[in-house]
Amino acid sequence: MTFEQAVQKLNQMEKALYALGHAEGILYVDGETVAPKQSWRARGNALAYLSELQYQQMTDPEAGEALSVILSDPEGTDEITFRRAEVLKERRDKTQLLPMEEFVAYQQLTNEASAVWHEAKLQSDFASFAPYLEKIVAFRRRYAARKDPSKPAYDVLLDEYEKGADMQSLDPFFKTLREDLSPLIAEIAAVPREKPAFMTKSYPVTGQRLFSEKIMALEGLDPERCSIGETEHPFTGGPNKWDVRITTHYHEEDVTGSLYSVIHEGGHALYELGVRDDLQFTCLGGGATMGIHESQSRFYENLIGRSRAFCAPLLAALREVFPEQMGDTTEEELYQGINLARPSLIRTEADELTYPLHVMVRYELEKLLVAGDLSVKDLPGEWNRWMKDALGVTVPDHRRGVLQDSHWSTGYLGYFPSYALGSAYGAQMLRRMEQETDVWGPVSRGDLSPVTEWLGQNIHQYGRLKKPKEILEKAMGGPLDASVYTGYLKDKFSRLYGL
Amino acid sequence: MTFEQAVQKLNQMEKALYALGHAEGILYVDGETVAPKQSWRARGNALAYLSELQYQQMTDPEAGEALSVILSDPEGTDEITFRRAEVLKERRDKTQLLPMEEFVAYQQLTNEASAVWHEAKLQSDFASFAPYLEKIVAFRRRYAARKDPSKPAYDVLLDEYEKGADMQSLDPFFKTLREDLSPLIAEIAAVPREKPAFMTKSYPVTGQRLFSEKIMALEGLDPERCSIGETEHPFTGGPNKWDVRITTHYHEEDVTGSLYSVIHEGGHALYELGVRDDLQFTCLGGGATMGIHESQSRFYENLIGRSRAFCAPLLAALREVFPEQMGDTTEEELYQGINLARPSLIRTEADELTYPLHVMVRYELEKLLVAGDLSVKDLPGEWNRWMKDALGVTVPDHRRGVLQDSHWSTGYLGYFPSYALGSAYGAQMLRRMEQETDVWGPVSRGDLSPVTEWLGQNIHQYGRLKKPKEILEKAMGGPLDASVYTGYLKDKFSRLYGL
């Protein structure tokens, strides 16, 4: 195979994989948002066939040859083509670990598990979900053993979402988070502080929908390229930079819940919307790793969205849509309200300070589950025990406990640490950003463009073109340092609570 | 190839075609409803690849052999398998008329034309759409010439949507409609009648959304299997009986617009929802022809939805959601209001009496366009002239004129007559239904189940299993007779207007 033929084959492969991934992605978004409930019965058939085709593309011997030809000539290949071959080679190696039947069966399993989880969560019924989770854990363990039998299975899975992450690096990371934050969380819990008045009002869903549009505009999301839907568990999807989808979930009694979901998913969306045009429709047209993706979502959600400066434009937007509910709320009250720090049950609704401990609980439980040291049957009990131990809260039911997150139902074992890592990355990025540009002046005037431009320059534009470590260390100005993140949190919350 | 091998190949082919059609269908529905505007830029890439795969499946020589083996043994093959082979053979023959490049290019053309039409309609700008329509007409003419050079091109296209339809049968059909209805339309136009008060009120979109749910429930649509979205031009989609989608369009100043869109699309949906389980995921799992499909949608919309009996449950539903706007409207006023007959501009909003003349105008213009006797450039002028001539209305702009319908942008040349044929079929079906079951008692109590059961038994369940003519003549109790339809209209509207 000549080099030209190899590149041609690569292009054919990308064209097919793009189209199949596009269809699969839209079927997923549609299934989670507007599809009728029983549609899952047949969506699996369609998805299974698309998976088969992806599998065939990935494992095609000719594709293997083409990738080898390209990868054997790093000097003669342009950067984009070389990196595409590198990323596809990695995916090919992963795909080849499984026979097609198993690959497709797994897609069907997670499709079904996802539907079952939705219902189980509504009913707070762990027993109906347990058999699916057992199969998923077993599958992921088998997969990890095949991929690298020399490593603990959980290390293999962690690396899938965050290149290079393993228990050796994450154990001390989470230890720092817990040791640095637990005393402050306890101190704050002793400070009496009430919800400000605006947080006790009712916010009709129709108003919140309109408010979401305002928040998206404030965040700088182009409505012609990014739309919003409604799901039980918010997420970001969409196949390219002209077609990004975010979702949120409305609660009448809590306007901040959806607000921060929208800002969070909007951060993911800005990443996808900012990837360079010449990487679109290739395997490089998306976020570099899950941790880097979460660094972006949590950057907007917390570092910007829960900052003192952002309270000015936020209050203005709230007043516009909800003049009655906001009454005479001041910026300072708003700032206190959106940063109320209290141990709580739900990760996605947790405040910025206690949030990382929610992630830590999942990390510890996943370690045990994947190692085979904890059975699925015993998981709810352990969940409740860990939540009591780490956060001091008593879990009243599985809906607000072990069933709250969708991740495990879709096979995402090892994903959760990305949230805490992303938050930590973000704190380091912010420090650099502040050195290079005026962040808070524009933010206080409702202009987030300097933030998005800086992140666009340093992170978004590259998609998967650069290696994650390279992108990250450049943007953070050095390696990961958990104490920057905990330092930021301690500083912010000590001031907020006058400690 | 043995018979067993042939059936196996048929099953493989159906599995692939189902999955690709499912994905394609959802991408289409998504694109029309919630996708961000610019998403069309890349959806075409994905759809083009799915089309390529469908083309390959359809034209695979092995598939040809398998179909021949099955079709050569009508005695030894069960009814379903034989009919599947027959339907696929017909599609294969059609697909093979075009080289793959042309097949895929056409999908891309209509995808792009559809986006351009949306914008052109908004701007009332025919010139921007004209080049696309020219290409589409040229393509469809070429296609027709290849399919059957012995026939006029328009006859070939008519047959695509309504098996057996041609100009020889449709010319007298439309002539009867015009001759029978025009005098009555003129007479009625001279009767002064005002809109009842409820039709001059404003109906907020949020209320209308809730009302749509009530109407869907009244029509007997299972919300777990059929969901509703919003589009410029309402339609029905969805890949199987567990996943049907309808759409509507809300106007604050007109509650009946969306009401009858919902009932109309709901009729299409009931057809899809009622196809037998054992035909699902095969090429038989859908409506028999477009005319029969429209007979169902227009059955619910007009014969039931605009009947005197339906006014009782309809008024109750309206009162529940819009108590203020409905005031003390009586059933009789409602009946008069939803049957106001006046020549108007928009087909989808036309009353039941003038509607067939809107279709006739399109039929006459399509005949000329496809024959090459009318250029796209001259189409708007001819449109306006025909509307004046047939309905006496002056078209103020292209948005409310030649650009109002989406059909031509998606290549549906020859589709429109299905609406009038469907209406005529429905009138004959109703006559038979009334002989066999009590229609109006239950309808007046808000129970449409006897109607849906009768249609389910006679039409829905079969999907494409029976030949269209067989289904139709059994359900109508004989061949098409336009005078039954015009008789029904003359009777209903003479009474309504006291003539």
Image (cartoon, coloured by chain):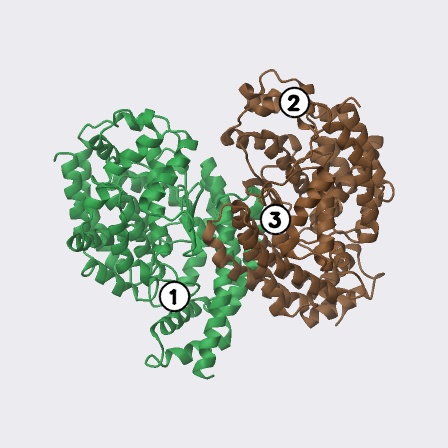
Chain colours: A green, B brown
Q: Are marks 3 and 2 on the same chain?
A: yes
Q: Earlier in the sequence, mark 3 or mark 2?
A: 2
- Residue situated furthest top in the rendering: B328
> In this figure, which residue is indicated by the disc labeled 2?
B194
Quarter of the image with the C terminus of chain B is top right
Mark in front: 3 vs 2? 2
Q: Nearer the viewer, residue B70 or A166?
A: B70
Q: Is residue A60 left or right of residue A299?
A: right
Label 2 crowd bin: few (<14), some (14–19), many (20+), radius 10 Å: few
Q: Give the Cα distance between marks 2 and 1.
A: 60 Å
- Residue situated furthest right in the rendering: B478
Q: Nearer the viewer, residue B164 or B441?
A: B164
Q: Nearer the viewer, residue B460 or A192?
A: B460
Chain containing the residue with disc 2: B
Query: Which residue is drawn at the image coordinates 38% and 49% (left, top)?
Result: A222
Numbered tag placed on residue A278 in the rendering: 1
